[in-house]
Amino acid sequence: MSTRRLVVTEIRMKLSNVMGLGDNTALDFLNSTVTQGASTFEFIESGHALVGWLHAAGLVSHDESRALLQMPISELDAQAAQARELREWLRSEVARWAELEKGEVSIDASVRLNELMAVDDFFRQLDSRGDLVLQRRWSSPRQLLAPIAHVFAELLSMGETAYVRRCEGTGCTMWFYDHTKSHRRRWCSMALCGNREKARNHRLRQATATSSERTAG
Ligand SMILES: [Zn+2]
């Protein structure tokens, strides 16, 4: 009896593989959970992961992230759960908005984003180069969602709906902002989806050609 070996190609993905593919911080936030075929990856599974995501996205500095990690873990975890819920709600809001020619922001979206941004606490500081910089005063884990709300408010107020798109890769859930000159971007990345889809289309074309040859013969 022959022994068949089952070869399973496991996809492994790290935050660094997907961060930046959205070419927009708000869309990168939607991509903080990714489904690729049968595998789903979650990059804000805990409060610490949420702080790590904010730092990787450039929304908090290294020093701020270190201070944030000192906050009670249970409160940080609760914010991560809120962030995941907010993300899925924003995903449907962005999808609806992106369908419109001239994106109108829903009342629900403006109310929710405004509430989250209202807990932000800024002050100005003069830095060593003589620049006046805006800094945040972090007093509560509740503020963790404020910078996220801020990047979505920016997207909805200034983004071009036509350039906000979902990756065309089969089974891929990623979003991106098409900043290319031709505005013909179709994939989250060539490495993750583009090459695979091209190979798949090539196989489909070959199969169609073979079956039409058979029909003709
Ligand atoms: Zn993709």
Image: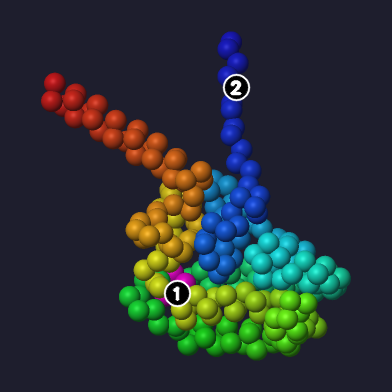
Image point (43%, 48%), residue name: 170
Image point (48%, 61%), residue name: 176
Residue 23 lies, in percent from the top left, at: 52, 62
Residue 86 lies, in percent from the top left, at: 60, 73
Q: What residue did someone put label 1 on?
A: 159
Image height of 184 relative to 63, above or below: above
Q: Quadrant of residue 183?
A: bottom left
Image point (76%, 79%), residue name: 127
Residue 101 lies, in percent from the top left, at: 33, 75
Q: Give 63 or 147, whichever is nearer the viewer.
A: 63
Name the N-terminal-most of marks 2 and 1: 2
Judged by its main secondary structure, the magenta piece is helix
Q: In the shown orientation, is residue 52 left or right of residue 188? A: right
| Separation of marks 2 and 1 at Cα, in angstroms | 50 Å
Quarter occupied by the N terminus = top right
Q: Quadrant of residue 100?
A: bottom left
Q: Are marks 2 and 1 in contact (CB under 8 Å)?
A: no
Q: Give 13 or 215, whichever is nearer the viewer.
A: 13
How packed mark 1 is, by other alpha carbons closer than 10 Å (few <14, some 14-19, many 20 or more), is some
Q: For marks 2 and 1, give the one nearer the viewer.
A: 1
Q: Is residue 30 visible?
A: no
Q: In the shown orientation, is residue 21 left or right of residue 50? A: left
Say whether residue 108 is magenta. Answer: no
Residue 8 lies, in percent from the top left, at: 59, 32
Q: What residue did someone put label 2 on?
A: 5
- The kind of residue tagged 1 is Gly
Segment tinted magenta in the rendering:
93-97
Q: In the shown orientation, is residue 102 left or right of residue 49? A: left
Residue positioned most to the front: 129
Image point (25%, 33%), residue name: 208
Q: Quadrant of residue 31?
A: bottom right
Q: Secondary structure at mark 2?
A: loop
